[in-house]
Image (spheres, rainbow, N blue to C red):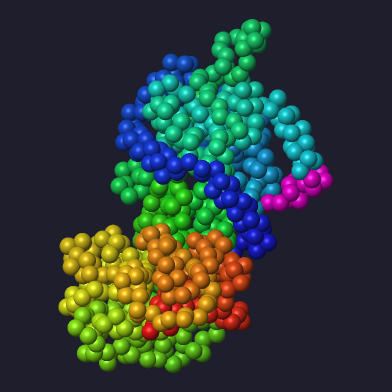
Amino acid sequence: MADHAGTSRANESRRHFRKRVRKALGFDFAAGRAELKQRRLANLDRLPELVEQFKTRLEEVDGQFHYARDAEEARQIIGEICTRAGAGIVTKSKSMATEEILLNPYLESLGMEVVETDLGERMVQLTHSHPSHLIAPAIHLTKEDAARVFGVEPTIEAIQAEARRSLREKFIAAKVGISGANAAIAETGTVMIVTNEGNADLTVTLPEVHIAVFGIDKVVATLDDTVAMLRMLPRSATGQRMSAYVNWITGPSRSGDIEQSLTIGVHGPREMHCVVLDNGRGEMREDPLMREALTCVRCGACSNVCPPFMAVSGHQFGHIYNGPIGLVLTPFHHGERLDDLPNSLCVQCNACEEVCPVGIPLPRQLLEHRRSSRKPAWKTAMLELWSSTLADPALRLAAPFSKLVPGAPAALATPPFRDRVRGDTAEGGAKTATIFASCLVDRVLPGEGEALQAILRAAGYRVQFPERQWCCGLICSNAGKFELGAKLSRQLNEALAGSTGPIVTPSASCFGAFTMDAEEWGVSTQERQAVAARMRDSTRFVLELLESRPELLGSDLPHTRVAYHDSCQSLRALGLRAEPRRVLQLAGYEVVDLPDSAGCCGFGGTFSIEWPEVAARILDWKLEALDQTGCEVLASDNPGCLMHIAGGARKRGRATRVAHVLELVAERLA
């Protein structure tokens, strides 16, 4: 795992990014995202045609087009251009495409000096590392690190002055300048470069030869497509309404005799080459699920909101491209499937998709990679056991010993909820409601199930609990075992099919998994339609009860302040934000929002087992946020979050009470 102090510094920088982004998004983000997504997908549909059109238009303005099938071919093309130009020094502006093809070491092997001119990239180059963030490559370094790199005092002014002095010499001496491109416009043969430093201007104008290296996915149809991108990219990347520099380059600036061109006042390169890279993008375009990753505009927003990325840094979270988008791209660009370790770093909180300016379904794409990744034997064995008939006897056998495991987030309940609720199946009034407890409530947090049972009985329901119910399949599917998730989902459907009345579950995640996610695991809508139509999440169900039956609650309720944690799935998948707060308010509680309430707690199913240190660091941030509220009670509607937070609080010796919304409501029943 990354150095704690370095990661904390990087995390603070990312929080600063997020604040700026929220401030800059003072416009209709949803509309801007919808337009950009529509345009990017439309361009993707026409991509071969647009690439050919771009080639034609580029050559009409004296530019030279080169198509590279893979990284090796791209390196060879660029190396030949640089060799013909007699390049001793090659300057580069920031380009992830050149990082992707490992260009620098290749050119250096040909005897050339390669100089990164973006300040962050230059620091990374001089420290012999690689970028840790798509747009802030040196976010893991401090100004003290930079001062050591440049041999100056640790002040911003001294670092900038030395970088400016040393790089100007390189700019003037370079024969070739290499850049990336944010877009390539097919209708004009124009390349667009967006930066916040003037280094790109000098890189593409001072040398005699300019090489732009970019993927085929950067080719767009019209200027209007780039305008839509410019509305979203700076806001999502750095919180700016517009980047400091936007360069539009259409062919070389001068041609013919160099001395004659300079005499008449024409400046800029005499050659302009565009190296357009496939390197797995064609395969990605043909994949119905993965093709949307090609709409990425490389803003880095997904990394800025990703809790595991913030905890471990980009050097741990990916390969050349890092962050959530990096985990999706790497198998295509580098020709191999990831093993389970980096892939399993995704906690499936959905924050990346929420902020993505083109709405790429990154969590689902990561799950698809996870399906084919190499998994450790212990993980496969655990999931096979979990989805078998041996799960019940194994958990009953282990329950007495689970209390002895040091540092465990929770002990197994003795007895489980299924044994406690059984006697209630024939009692109550004329109405019937069915409880789907979820595996966690059944085996670890039975108090949450008992609270739901109490609320239902108070409202006059006769409670059913089909004993064959077990898991919704989310744990297995999130671990990449879709076939086991589908098996469990079908078994749950069969178990609940014979019940009557609404099926209420205290687990918002399980509700979403059964009603929304199971189809992607292979369980058709028709198979589970009748049961899914009756299933209700407990938050909305109880809210309707309390609003229609206020007499269910006692009078003269004591005043208690409660901090509320939004679980990732409740908030982002189910849209539950106001509802749980309203439930608590009706029950007489004062609800206090946690700072960064939407931040993940670090549970993530098997994530907290595989990455305990990362999960603990994310949880520390959640507990620090709780401290800022001054509340001694934290509430949520998700059993997984509650188990993780409660276990972490106990381990840290805290007296914080962690409770399900249902438990707090049940305590206020008349």
Q: Horizontal and vertical percent for residue 655? A: 59, 82
Q: Quadrant of residue 429?
A: bottom left
Q: Horizontal and vertical percent for residue 100? A: 51, 43
Q: Horizontal and vertical percent for residue 50? A: 36, 28
Q: Horizontal and vertical percent for residue 632? A: 57, 77
Q: Is residue 153 magenta?
A: yes
The stretch of residues the image draws in magenta is: 141-155
Q: Residue at x 37, y 24 (%)?
A: 53
Q: Is residue 380 visible?
A: yes
Q: Is residue 469 visible?
A: no
Above or below residue 436? Residue 184 is above
Q: Quadrant of residue 466?
A: bottom left
Q: Residue at x 27, y 73 (%)?
A: 488
Above or below residue 446? Residue 387 is above
Above or below residue 622? Residue 253 is above
313 or 60: nearer the viewer: 313
Above or below residue 29? Residue 2 is below
Task: Count the numbered circles shown.
Answer: 0
Q: Residue at x 79, y 45 (%)?
A: 155
Q: In the rendered view, does 275 fall on the left or right side of 168?
A: left
551 or 206: nearer the viewer: 551
Quadrant location of the C terminus in the rendered image = bottom left
Quadrant location of the N terminus in the rendered image = bottom right
Q: Residue at x 51, y 48 (%)?
A: 301
Residue projecting furthest to the right: 153
Q: In the rendered view, does 104 fall on the left or right side of 73?
A: right
